[in-house]
Image (cartoon, helix red, strand yellow):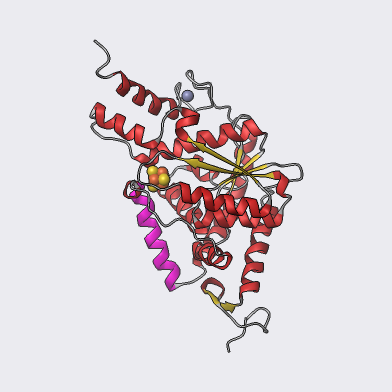
Amino acid sequence: MITCDICKARPAQFLQHHAKRRVCKTCFENDILSRVKDTIKRFNMISEGDKVLVAVSGGKDSLTLLDILANLMDNNKIVALSIVEGISGYNREEDVALVRHITRMHGIDHLVVTLKDIIGYGVDDFMHAQQKLKVRSPLSACTFCGIARRRVMNSIAREIGATKIATGHNLDDEVQTYIINILRGDIVRLIQSHPLSAPHAPSLIKRIKPLRYVYEYETTIYAYIKGFHFQDTECPYINQRPTLRAKIRSMLIEIESKAPGTLLNLITYLDTVIEPLVLKYQKESITLPQCTKCGEPTSPKRTVCKFCTLVDLILQASRVGKDG
Ligand code: SF4
Ligand code: ZN
């Protein structure tokens, strides 16, 4: 029997490539919990008095996040949020049931909302609108989905008095985001993707990513250990995900397989070198303009926010055939 490299007693069950060690179930779980705890502390992600809205899609990352936070903090300070995007053929009922199973187990409040209920339209509505208008270079479903979900998360967080929004982005996701912003030379987004950056408007609730030091393969193992039968139905729009991210993802997987631990070293390094920039930028903090349509903060130089522009497209499409 191969014994665990940490406790030297129980049988080893999993290989942690990046740390070059074999670990038992208990030591694996403890390691993940303590890494998340350290990450929360290092970046002051959750303080006393914070109420955290956890966005839970039903995938392995968000289920892992919910379970870990439930183990680390007062469960009365957590609210889980499931957002149904309005994508036909994408079964959300099972996902919601799974989230409910976990929230019940921990006694956590669980909100389920649909994009349609909150903003009036789902992802399919947006895609149909573009088809109807015969838009020459249509935007991807993921563009609308991402913007709409962020808008809904923020407004629900405000409504329930949540002070933080937690998402299940893992180490792999976060390194990809850093690389994309570096390749684009987008210094503003690079700084914004640092865990210490603050939102640029009081109405924007700070988003936190407590799994940023946990590899994707580790969230898969964690979900497996816990018996979370996470959703395996793929979104029919999956191929519309940004191609640059997909390319960077496969490049990073290859690098990591040749030199395990590279991604963890890279994020640790980037978090450290970007930190002074975040602090400097914070001092010269900018005030974002307000969207003239919805009143929410928008990017500098914009008068109408991206969300309102997308919704406008749906409204235009609904007028086609009615006018005249
Ligand atoms: Fe939304 Fe795109 Fe993910 Fe589908 S693949 S759920 S459209 S972000
Ligand atoms: Zn707007």
Helix, strand or loop for the magenta stretch, by majority: helix
Horizontal side of residue 263 vs 70, given as left or right? left
Q: Residue at x 46, y 72 (%)?
A: 259
Of all residues shown, which one is farthest toward the top? 324
Q: Residue at x 43, y 25 (%)?
A: 308
For the record, the magenta segment spans 241-258
Q: Position of residue 113 (x, y in %)?
A: 52, 37
Horizontal side of residue 76 vs 304, given as left or right? right
Screen quadrant of the N terminus: bottom right
Q: Position of residue 87 (x, y in %)?
A: 38, 41
Q: Visible in this render: residue 32?
A: yes
Q: Is residue 177 above or below residue 215?
A: above
Compare residues 101 and 274 and report the one nearer the observer: 101
Of all residues shown, which one is farthest toward the right? 48
**Count of marks overlaid on the render:** 0
Q: Visible in this render: residue 299?
A: no
Compare residues 57 and 104 and report the one nearer the observer: 104
Q: Position of residue 135 (x, y in %)?
A: 25, 30
Q: Is residue 221 above or below residue 283?
A: below
Compare residues 206 and 97 and report the one nearer the observer: 97
Horizontal side of residue 295 vs 186, given as left or right? right
Q: Residue at x 26, y 19 (%)?
A: 320
Q: Is residue 78 above or below residue 299?
A: below
Q: Is residue 244 magenta?
A: yes
Q: Position of residue 81 (x, y in %)?
A: 57, 42
Q: Residue at x 35, y 56 (%)?
A: 247
Screen quadrant of the C terminus: top left
When asked about the image quadrant of residue 200, the answer is: top right
